Image: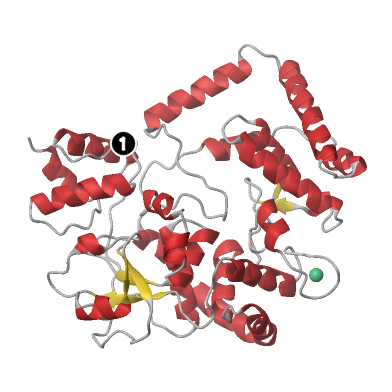
């Protein structure tokens, strides 16, 4: 129970159901409110115009430098040494590529099938198994201390950085300064920038080696600076918390983070299940947690091979990432903890599935071909639902909780499985007067 009710993020997770919004952790990259590509283009043009038309490059630089001076004062006021601040921010300028990344928008929904096929490949599974064997002693020592099973740590490591291969080549200070100076999410990134300066001030990493994603996710487990400050640990005992190069620190930091967020070392994350004919798909919601026993006895859910669900005393929520035609999962408390790491439901399923594959489980039983839908058409669908009296809220192209509920009610009204999952077939029906 606990976590299911404690975490207020559930609604926001649901708002992103079915779409990966960000693959790095912690940073909430929801789609901007303007969602159609036409609007995006207009926004891009408007931004470009106000940045470039009235101000010369020199004036823009002067504005940034003034902003940077204020930031330096704030950092020093927080107890970070001024020599650290000056050295770390020397010559820092806005990075155009970071702004481009921040403003780029997905034009289509990302499907679970596509996501899981690209992130949980046989090659990655094989490599993960080899690496788990190679580091088994270390991983087991970490499991004893933090209670996180090795296969999950290797799974996060694989998905976050392909086992340390892709940690991002952006200078973290420059990237965070760019985003903190930019108006869109300045408060969030300003705080991350201050945390990054603190990490440098503690001598944990040299500024030129502090590299990460365009949004400041760092090292082999892609921690943003505040996560690093709160959760990274020194497990190899050299006095430094090093999530870039020290595998003991990398695994232990991930384990500590998960453990602090409620991970249970004696439970798995969830499992793929089989639904009986006539299952009420509107029961599939992260807001609906029921005991396993109830899923089995009242709803007729079984393991994927048809055998009974485990008799463990666990609460679980049903997740249908591809709607009623796709795979069904019962997700336990640890799934909720994965969602704290990254709120994408697709990411969380991929972490769990990769961990299962590492332990020898077969690929998922069903992965239907799914058709990505343009966000413009999702907006149209929302307007159509509203027009028919199913309140999907202001059309915004996001398949959120309200849109799913409206779609589910519409499905129910026409006698279709009420999974709240948008398909072109359904949208064609909605288009009919
Ligand atoms: Ca260390």
Quarter where residue 37 is shown = top left
Residue drawn at the location 33% of the way across and 87% of the way down: 311
Q: Does residue 31 lie above or below 206 as drawn?
A: above
Q: Position of residue 10 (x, y in %)?
A: 42, 55
Location of residue 282 in the rendering, given as x and y in whole percent from the top left corner = 21, 60
Label 1: state its secondary structure: helix
Q: How many marks?
A: 1
Where on the picture, by quarter, is residue 279?
Answer: bottom left
Q: From the viewer's perspective, is 315 left or right of 409?
A: right
In the current view of this chain or complex, which residue is farthest to the top?
54
- 277 or 424, which is in the foreground? 277
Q: Is mark 1 within 8 Å of ligand 1?
A: no
Tell me where residue 204 appears, x and y as whole percent: 83, 59
Judged left or right of residue 48, residue 401 is left
Name the side, left or right, on which 306 lies relative to 89: left
Color style of the picture: secondary structure
Q: Residue at 68% across / 87% down in the picture?
A: 137
Q: Quadrant of the C terminus?
A: top left
The x and y percentages for residue 3 are: 47, 66
Q: Which residue is mark 1?
A: 376
The answer to which of 430 and 56 lies nearer the viewer is 430
Q: Which residue is located at x 70 percent, y 83 percent?
A: 138
Where is residue 326, by image quadrant?
A: bottom left
- How crowded pointer 1 is (Cα within 10 Å; few <14, some 14-19, many 20+) is rated as some
Q: Identify the residue at horizontal 67%, vertical 36% (top origin).
A: 180
Q: Nearer the viewer, residue 118 or 346?
A: 346
As drawn, the residue found furthest toward the right would be 83
Quick check: can you spot residue 398?
A: yes
Would residue 219 be seen by someone viewing this image from the given angle?
A: no
Q: Quadrant of ligand 1?
A: bottom right
């Amino acid at each position: 129970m606990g976590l299911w009710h404690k975490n207020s993020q559930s609604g926001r997770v649901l708002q992103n159901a079915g779409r990966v919004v960000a693959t790095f952790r912690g940073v909430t990259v929801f789609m901007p409110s303007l969602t159609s590509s036409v609007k995006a283009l207009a926004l891009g043009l408007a931004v470009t115009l106000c940045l470039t038309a009235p101000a010369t490059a020199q004036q823009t630089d002067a504005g940034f430098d003034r902003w940077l001076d204020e930031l330096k004062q704030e950092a020093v006021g927080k107890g970070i040494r001024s020599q650290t601040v000056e050295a770390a921010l020397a010559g820092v300028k806005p990075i155009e590529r970071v702004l481009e990344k921040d403003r780029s928008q997905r034009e289509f929904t990302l499907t679970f099938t596509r996501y899981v096929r690209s992130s949980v490949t046989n090659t990655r599974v094989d490599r993960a198994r080899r690496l788990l064997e190679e580091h088994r002693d270390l991983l087991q020592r970490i499991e004893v201390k933090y209670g996180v099973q090795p296969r999950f740590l290797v799974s996060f490591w694989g998905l976050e950085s392909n086992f340390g291969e892709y940690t991002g080549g952006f200078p973290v200070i420059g990237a965070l300064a760019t985003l903190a100076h930019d108006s869109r999410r300045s408060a969030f990134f300003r705080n991350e920038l201050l945390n990054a300066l603190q990490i440098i001030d503690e001598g944990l990493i040299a500024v030129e080696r502090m590299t990460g994603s365009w949004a400041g996710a760092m090292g082999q487990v892609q921690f943003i600076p505040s996560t690093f400050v709160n959760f990274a640990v020194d497990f190899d005992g050299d006095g430094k918390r090093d999530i870039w190069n020290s595998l003991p620190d990398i695994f232990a930091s991930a384990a500590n983070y998960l453990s602090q967020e409620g991970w249970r070392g004696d439970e798995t994350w969830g499992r793929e299940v089989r639904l009986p004919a006539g299952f009420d798909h509107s029961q599939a919601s992260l807001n609906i947690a029921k005991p396993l026993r109830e899923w089995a006895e009242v709803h007729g859910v079984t393991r994927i091979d048809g055998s009974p669900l485990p008799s463990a005393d666990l609460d679980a929520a049903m997740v249908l990432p591809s709607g009623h035609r796709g795979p069904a999962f019962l997700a336990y408390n640890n799934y909720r903890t994965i969602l704290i790491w990254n709120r994408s439901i697709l990411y969380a399923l991929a972490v769990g599935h990769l961990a299962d594959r590492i332990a020898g489980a077969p690929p998922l039983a069903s992965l239907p071909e799914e058709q990505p839908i343009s966000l413009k058409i999702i907006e149209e669908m929302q307007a159509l639902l509203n027009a028919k009296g199913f309140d999907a809220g202001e059309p915004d192209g996001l398949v959120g909780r309200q849109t799913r509920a409206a779609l589910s009610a519409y499905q129910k009204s026409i006698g279709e499985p009420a999974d709240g999952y948008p398909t072109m077939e359904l949208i064609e029906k909605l288009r009919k007067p």
